[in-house]
Image: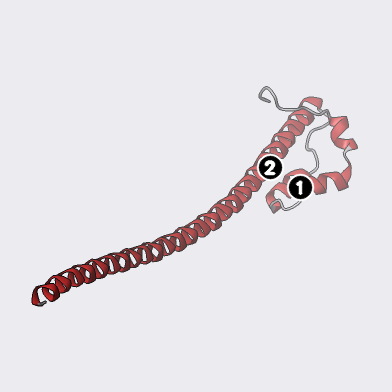
Amino acid sequence: MLSPGIRTLSKKDLEAAGKDEREALLEHDSDLEEMLFSQPSTSSGNENVDHKMDSVKLQIQEVQDVMRDNVQKVMDRGERLEDLQEASDRLNMAGNEFRETAKRAQRRAWLQNVKSRFIIISITVTIVLFIVGKKSHCAFI
């Protein structure tokens, strides 16, 4: 029995499909499926049996189509996962480079701060020594 949404073709449509078209549809299928489709009908002209065989063939073709679509989707998903992995690796490398650059900038800023403090302290000490030296020099005079 066919479920709703499944297409149905008449025997006439299947016969009109031609051998080349059937082979294209059945490409990459197993030997068992080829045997199913290549066996002659055992019915003695009974239209009901032919219809059931056609229905089974259609269901098999639809299942094959769904499976091919699923395989294609899995392959596409794998490619997208590989792309995401590559993007993740690039981001990781960029993050590491940023971290190293930030550390270098922090070291430079710290060194510049130390230099500035040293210069300010040196100038202050020089001024204090100059003032103390001037007072002591004035005390001797």
Tag 2: amino acid = Gln
Can you say whether 106 is above or below 139 in the image?
above
Residue 111 in the image: state x and y as whole percent.
Answer: 33, 68
Residue 52 shown left or right of residue 74 in the figure? right
Between 93 and 57, the one lying in front of the other is: 93
Residue to which mark 1 is pinned: 26
> How many numbered marks, from 0 up?
2
Residue drawn at the location 59% of the way across and 50% of the way down: 80
Residue to which mark 2 is pinned: 64
Q: Are marks 2 and 1 in contact (CB under 8 Å)?
A: yes
Farthest residue to the top: give it. 4
Which type of secondary structure does the marked residue at label 2 adopt?
Answer: helix
Residue 4 in the image: state x and y as whole percent.
Answer: 67, 22
Residue 91 shown left or right of residue 126 in the figure? right
Residue 36 in the image: state x and y as whole percent.
Answer: 73, 44
Farthest residue to the left: give it. 139
